Image (spheres, rainbow, N blue to C red):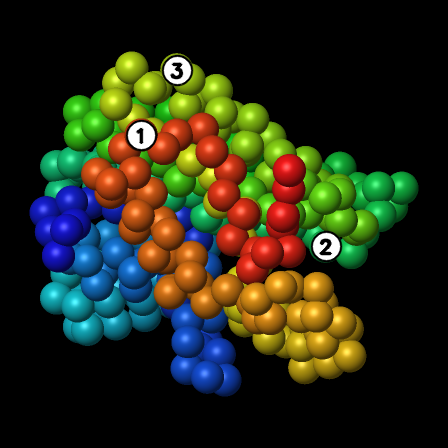
């Protein structure tokens, strides 16, 4: 258990309903399972206290780790610095250290064109994604500096490839990539590595999309050379475990596309 005694913060990691095959139904919870298997203690955040408590109970029961679940929602109507500071203060009170920060939380209005997008919809993506990532990185920095820790942020192919109907989501995700590259430069001398993952994962929402649009789903699958969407726990969680490990200490400022070959770039 290479992460025994280490503490990992994962935003957006409540427990969703499992998929039809029994696998994790969200990226955040899949990542939590991957780190729990390695013995890490976890701090999980999200908006839904019920899903957080369910995740805490299952992770502690199955893997014998400690989990701190904190309700936290970065949005346009609150003091977001205080919201995030509460999470970090409680983490230090409970565990005394932070080794890994994973910014996974994101909400957005999908399928809305630029011409029809409202300010409120744009704010939803920016606050839940870009601003949340900024506040967590800023608050965790002093603690990550002490542990020479790691930051893993999440972006998307929607930003890389300009997917229709994803303007605010793509803008937030590309902002996160820019922020991450700057942090990799500024924090490198402190021994902190900062990387970005662009996933294409089978989640609860994608499962619902598959059921409603089976033909479009099959067409999408045909565009993935490996022939399937990523498993949040095995395909994405395990890459996070690697990026936060000593084996990846020289990897920083990178964007890694976990899209089964569909994200091929020069």
Q: Which residue is drawn at 38% across and 64% down?
A: 233
Looking at the rendered structure, the secondary structure element under dot 2 is loop
Q: Which residue lies furthest to the front in this view?
A: 266
Q: Give residue 89's quadrant in the image.
A: top left
Disc 1/disc 3 C-alpha distance (Å)? 15 Å
**What residue is shown with label 3?**
186
Q: Number of callouts in the render? A: 3
Disc 1/disc 2 C-alpha distance (Å)? 36 Å
Q: Residue furthest right?
A: 115
- Whichever of callouts 1 and 3 sits on the residue coming sooner in the sequence is 3
The correct choice, above or below, for 143 with respect to 228 in the image is above
- Whichever of callouts 2 and 3 sits on the residue coming sooner in the sequence is 2
Q: Can residue 82 be seen in this view?
A: no
Labels 1, 3: front one: 1
| Cβ atoms under marks 2 and 3 closer than 8 Å | no
Picture coordinates of residue 209, whole percent (x, y): 68, 73
Looking at the rendered structure, the secondary structure element under dot 1 is loop
**Residue 110: mark:** 2
Q: Residue at x 55, y 43 (%)?
A: 155
**What residue is shown with label 1?**
250
Q: Which image quadrant: the C terminus?
A: top right
Labels 1, 2: front one: 1
């Amino acid at each position: 258990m290479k992460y025994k005694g280490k503490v990992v913060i994962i935003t957006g990691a409540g427990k969703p309903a499992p998929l039809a095959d029994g696998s994790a139904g969200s990226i955040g919870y899949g990542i939590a399972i991957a780190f729990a298997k390695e013995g890490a203690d976890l701090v999980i955040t999200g908006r839904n206290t019920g899903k957080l408590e369910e995740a805490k109970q299952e992770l502690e029961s199955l893997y014998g780790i400690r989990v701190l679940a904190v309700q936290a929602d970065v949005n346009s109507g609150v003091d977001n610095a205080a919201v995030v500071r509460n999470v970090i203060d409680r983490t230090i009170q409970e565990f005394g250290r932070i080794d890994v920060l994973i910014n996974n939380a994101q909400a957005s209005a999908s399928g809305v064109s630029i011409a029809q997008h409202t300010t409120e919809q744009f704010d939803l993506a920016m606050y839940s994604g870009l601003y949340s990532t900024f506040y967590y990185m800023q608050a965790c920095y002093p603690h990550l500096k002490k542990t020479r820790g790691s930051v893993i942020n999440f972006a998307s192919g929607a930003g890389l490839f300009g997917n229709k109907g994803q303007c605010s989501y793509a803008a937030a995700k590309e902002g996160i990539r820019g922020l991450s590259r700057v942090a990799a430069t500024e924090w490198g001398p402190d021994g902190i590595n900062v990387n970005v993952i662009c996933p294409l994962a089978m989640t609860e929402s994608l499962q619902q999309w598959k059921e409603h649009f089976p033909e479009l789903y099959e067409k999408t699958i045909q565009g993935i050379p490996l022939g399937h969407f990523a498993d949040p726990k095995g395909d994405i969680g395990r890459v996070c475990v690697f990026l936060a490990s000593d084996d990846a200490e020289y990897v920083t400022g990178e964007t890694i596309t976990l899209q089964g070959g569909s994200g091929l770039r020069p």
